[in-house]
Image (spheres, rainbow, N blue to C red):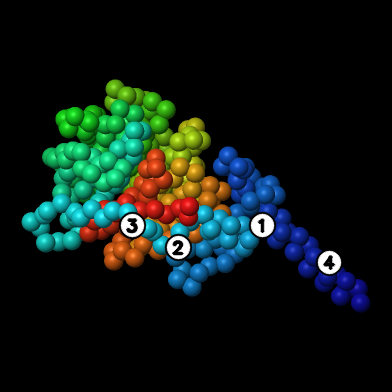
Amino acid sequence: MSSSKEDRRMMSSKSSKRVSRKRKSKISITNDNAIVEGGDKCQMQTKPHSRKETGEIWTTQNNSRSTANFAESFLKKVDVKRHIPPPESDDPLPYLKTIGGISVCDDNLIWVNYTLHRQVKLFTPSGEVLKTVRLDDRCQFTCCLPSGDLLLTQGTMYGSQPIITLVQRTGDVRKFANLCSFAKNLLGILFQDDMIYVIGHRTPKKDFIITLNMDGVVQTIIDTKPDKININHIISYSQTGRIFAVSTDGFAIFPLETASVSSKEINKVHVNHTYSKTACFDNFGNLIIGLRSEIFVTDPSLERSHEIQTGFPVLVTSTAVDKQNQLWIGIGTGDLYITEYLNK
């Protein structure tokens, strides 16, 4: 009898320790997305609670009722308002037509980057072309300045250089900054609060963030913690000012802290087999993610997700939401779509 009691006490002790360890390993996210240890609300499990058969996306701690209410805000399939074919190209290879990025200006004009065509186009919200600007280099990442000018970087393509290029609204093109003293390559780029943030890459593989002022002068270097977080895209939700780096290893986003990029991924909806440049925020703080030919919308707490079908035949390569809440989608063939995704 005493042996049985002793066994139960040992089992109870082990169970308590397991519970304690689990609590310590959790991260909770407050309403403003600040990260705190422990806590009783919105805790993220270290392993998924449930997972779809496809193995591509799963959520933790989903509440079926709240998820259903969230899903009702969106369409089940995008409503295409306009289809814009890719520019003419003599090269038969379809990957040469990929849309590398879409950037929305403050006045709701939209820059679209046709990466391997070496050109960017400026569109009205209805899809009319206002300007086509040809580039000397193939650029992969873009962001808009308050003036409506466009900044571009070349990524890690063969022969790429760590140069930030400025395309002005007038169509003039000039070098904005040469960061060869700091990085071998430049990837994602973002403007916010009179500062420019650009992801730098060095060999052996190390990613970090460089901040510059509006004159193109380097201000700070923000390292990743630990040293080898792989990031290549950077996004922000303008209404909160929170900045996130996007990982290339399965989909994860990491908050930009004061002196480093945190290693604590905060998203509770995990996505694999996606392209990090498809990530953007809409005007309500929802995270938009392109996954193959689907769009996933994740709520600001990063707990609930809704799948939207596109019906497009190839990969989604870029997304952006304009000021009129239209979802712009670029795909691997260079086709551009202006769509509705909200359930009005």
User: For residue 150, what is the image quadrant?
Assistant: top left
Instruction: Give neighbour class at mark 4: few <14, some 14-19, many 20+ (Cα, 10 Å).
Output: few
Q: For mark 1, what is the residue?
A: 22
Camera-nearest residue between 174 and 305: 305
- Amino acid carrying label 3: it is Val
The mark nearer the N terminus, 1 or 2, is 1
**Which picture quadrant has residue 304?**
bottom right
Which residue is denoted by mark 3 in the rendering?
A: 80
Q: Residues within 10 Å of mark 2 (few under 14, many from 20)?
A: some
Kind of element beneath mark 4: helix
Q: Which residue is mark 2?
A: 76
Mark number, residue 9? 4
43 to 143, vertically: above or below? below
Q: Earlier in the sequence, mark 4 or mark 2?
A: 4
Helix, strand or loop at label 2? It is strand
Disc 1 residue crowd, few under 14, some 14–19, many 20+, Cα 10 Å: few
Q: CA distance from mark 1 to mark 2?
A: 36 Å
Give residue 83's position: percent from left, percent from top.
Answer: 26, 55
> How many residues crowd around disc 3 within 10 Å: few (fewer than 14), some, or many (20 or more)?
some
